[in-house]
Amino acid sequence: MSGEHTELSGPDFVRGVPLTQVPDGGMLAGHAHGKPVLLARQGDELFAVGAVCTHYGGPLADGLLVGHSVRCPWHHACFDLRTGEPARAPALKPIARWALERRDGTVFVTGEIEAPTRATVAPGRPPASGRASTPASVIVVGAGAAGDAAADMLRREGYAGPITLIGADDSAPYDRPNLSKDYLAGTAPEEWIPLRAASFYEENAIDLVRGRRVTAIDPAGKRVVLDDGGTHGFGALLLATGATPVQLPTLLSGGSRVHYLRTLADSREIVAAAAGARCAVVLGASFIGLEVAASLRARGLEVHVVAPDQRPLERVLGPQLGDFVRGLHEAHGVTFHLGRTASQIDAGVVTLGGRERISADLVVAGVGVRPNDELAAGAGLSVERGVLVDEYLETSAPGVFAAGDVARYPDPRSGERIRIEHWVVAQRQGQIAARNILGRRERFDSAPFFWSQHYDVSISYVGHAERWDRIEVSGSLDSRDATVAFRADGKTFAVATVGRDRASLEAEVAMEAGLAETLAPSGASRGRG
């Protein structure tokens, strides 16, 4: 997935390339010594780095140069051109750096620069502002996207104290988005699923506690209690407890097995059940539900989707994209039962409200999630449909932070508190929370981003629009080449793209620069939401 076998193209930088071929503020893809290399230029500064994103292998040359960083077009990972370090999630590993020379107006790449070895525990550095000292220890509750990213960032920022990462899952942190996509479809092997090498946590002196739940936290006494009765003291605490799938009423299933998808174990169970199944029913036309539907179709199952909505994903993506997504799935053989709900689930059959019966060897429910905020509420923290945090991701208890699916934070673009259930947002919040634990006082102001894969079509979404009074479409969804802007009160709050990765990046940059009003597509077709 890291692009190690990327086919080489473009000029051979070892032989040299005229400087004029690298435009100011632009990039040029090529290769050197058998590896893909990217040349980037900002004024008089030239950089030579690896040309492939270390997340899923996206081509960085098709991305966007922003200051001294390059952003990947696929999933918006960001790398520092000066160091190669992943500046923002979802990438976790650096890209290579290459040495270069300029001679008589020609640029030559001379060799790869050896990556610095991260010390097991790097020496600490004083905080830029805020607290007078770094915490004596840090406990992270939750080993998902936010928790793993936070533990890593603490070490990257030079924190030398003890870090304990506590996860209820028996597995080490893994790539959760893949569970409903390629892994469930059978096109990604399980060795792709772990986020990091097994040795990472030991090498970085991160105490990874697996298969344990925190049952209580004491912010004043600075300790947590585990389900085995053990206690751990902390100097600072990060709650990254995530969310739990909403369960169907017990009476609905009558004891029949209904699968939910949140963990690696859940995905394994669905894979095992699919092996002996012919027909599957997916309850709910959420992103997870539809990705599960696509994955089960890839495994050859007959798939029915049952949902109370008139269009899939309409409340998030609007009617135009909702119809587009429905068409994609129907073209791949999925049958929709919209405006319907299940009234009974028995072995081998799902009965709908109108008494229609659907054969079902496998039933998967994707009807939403709820934030795991019970720990915070029990500890007296401010909770309202999630754990309330300020712009620095700190809760109502000093020294206690929250990040990821459980955190409700102030959105600088809408002026409202929002809670986002997306992988990249969780990782980026974990990174910012880690820096703020060390007193950096950085606001979380990243524009939310997520992607959803439906067969060979990926939809990228930047921003957050809980409501809109106008949707503007530029391009053609039928041609899989479109930008969709969600507007309210004359402002653009979100932009979705199909087949326009660079436009998605440009929307992200504009939103974070406070220039969202420039994002309305010119010549767009318009419709009311």
Image: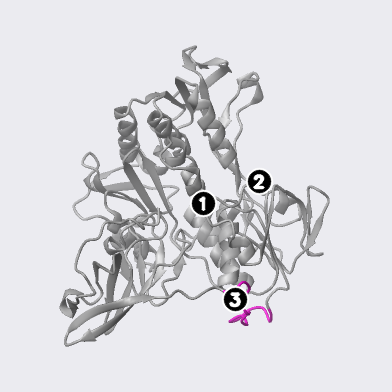
Label 2 to label 1: alpha-carbon separation: 25 Å
Question: In 3D space, how far apart are the residues under numbered discs 3 and 2 (Cα atoms)?
Answer: 28 Å
* Residue type (three-letter) at the residue carrying disc 3: Gly
Q: Left of 83 or right of it: where is 327?
A: left
Q: Magenta segment: does it hold 296?
A: no
Which of these two is toward me, 140 or 497?
A: 140
**Majority secondary structure in the magenta region:** loop
The amino acid at mark 2 is Asp
**Which mark, by number, is residue 158?**
3
Asked if disc 2 and disc 1 are in contact, CB closer than 8 Å, the reply is no
According to the picture, the residue beneath numbered tag 1 turns out to be 420
Which residue carries the number 2 mark? 170
In this rendering, does residue 522 appear at all?
Answer: yes
> Where residue 218 sits: x, y (%)?
79, 59
Residue 338 in sight here: no
Q: Residues within 10 Å of mark 3 (few under 14, many from 20)?
A: some
How far apart marks 1 and 3 lie (CA) works out to: 29 Å
